[in-house]
């Protein structure tokens, strides 16, 4: 069950903890988790729900995470998991550097945390928007920072 070399369930959990995953998407996410090899009953039940499953969908999703053996994580850990997945995608050319940096920037904002761990992504994404002539340089900086994270140096 991998998503770009990382556990899809952990990535989904990170999005959930950060508030980046709306509950209306939980049935769709459960279906994707099943496609990636999970045999957790709650994910099967959730995949059959409508997008307005409400509280029941949330309960099934959280029960599915527990049954899958996923321990609860802090917002800080969720942000690290999320950023690592995005970094893998940047390095693997699955997403554009600017788009990845902006996703990390938005995740930091969503976390409500005061952290400087991802300042290089935030700076590069914000300057990328304003300095069109320097976009290649900022893309390169984003790619280099993503490589550091993937290597465990970030």
Image (tube, helix red, strand yellow):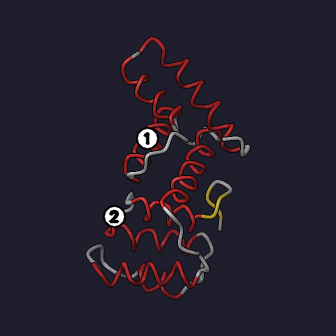
Residue at 59% of width from left, 83% of height from top? 39
* Labels in figure, total: 2
**In the picture shown, does residue 27 fall above or below 40?**
above
Question: Secondary structure under badge 1?
Answer: helix
Front one among 118 and 136: 118
Question: Secondary structure under badge 2?
Answer: loop
Front one among 16 and 36: 16
Q: Which class describes the residues within 10 Å of circle 1: few (<14), some (14-19), or many (20+)?
A: many
Counting residues from the N terminus, which is met first, the one under dot 2 or under dot 1? 2
Seen in the image, is 1 located left or right of residue 24?
right
Q: Which residue is mark 1?
A: 105
Front one among 115 and 125: 115
Q: Quadrant of the C terminus?
A: top right
Q: Position of residue 31 (x, y in %)?
A: 48, 73
Residue at 43% of width from left, 41% of height from top? 105
Q: Which class describes the residues within 10 Å of circle 2: few (<14), some (14-19), or many (20+)?
A: few
Residue 22 shows which numbered tag?
A: 2
Q: Position of residue 77 (x, y in %)?
A: 56, 59
């Amino acid at each position: 069950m991998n998503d770009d070399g990382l556990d899809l369930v952990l990535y989904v959990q990170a999005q959930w903890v950060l508030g980046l995953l709306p509950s209306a998407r939980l049935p769709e996410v459960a279906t994707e988790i099943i496609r990636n090899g999970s045999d957790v009953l709650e994910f099967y039940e959730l995949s059959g729900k409508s997008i307005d499953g409400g509280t029941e969908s949330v309960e099934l999703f959280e029960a599915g995470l527990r049954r899958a053996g996923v321990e609860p994580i802090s917002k800080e850990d969720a942000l690290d998991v999320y950023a690592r997945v995005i970094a893998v995608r940047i390095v693997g050319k699955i997403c554009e550097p600017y788009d990845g940096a902006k996703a990390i920037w938005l995740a930091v904002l969503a976390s409500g945390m005061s952290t400087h761990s991802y300042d290089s992504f935030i700076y590069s994404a914000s300057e990328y928007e304003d300095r069109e002539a320097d976009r290649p340089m900022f893309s390169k900086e984003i790619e280099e920072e993503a490589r550091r994270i993937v290597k465990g140096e970030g």
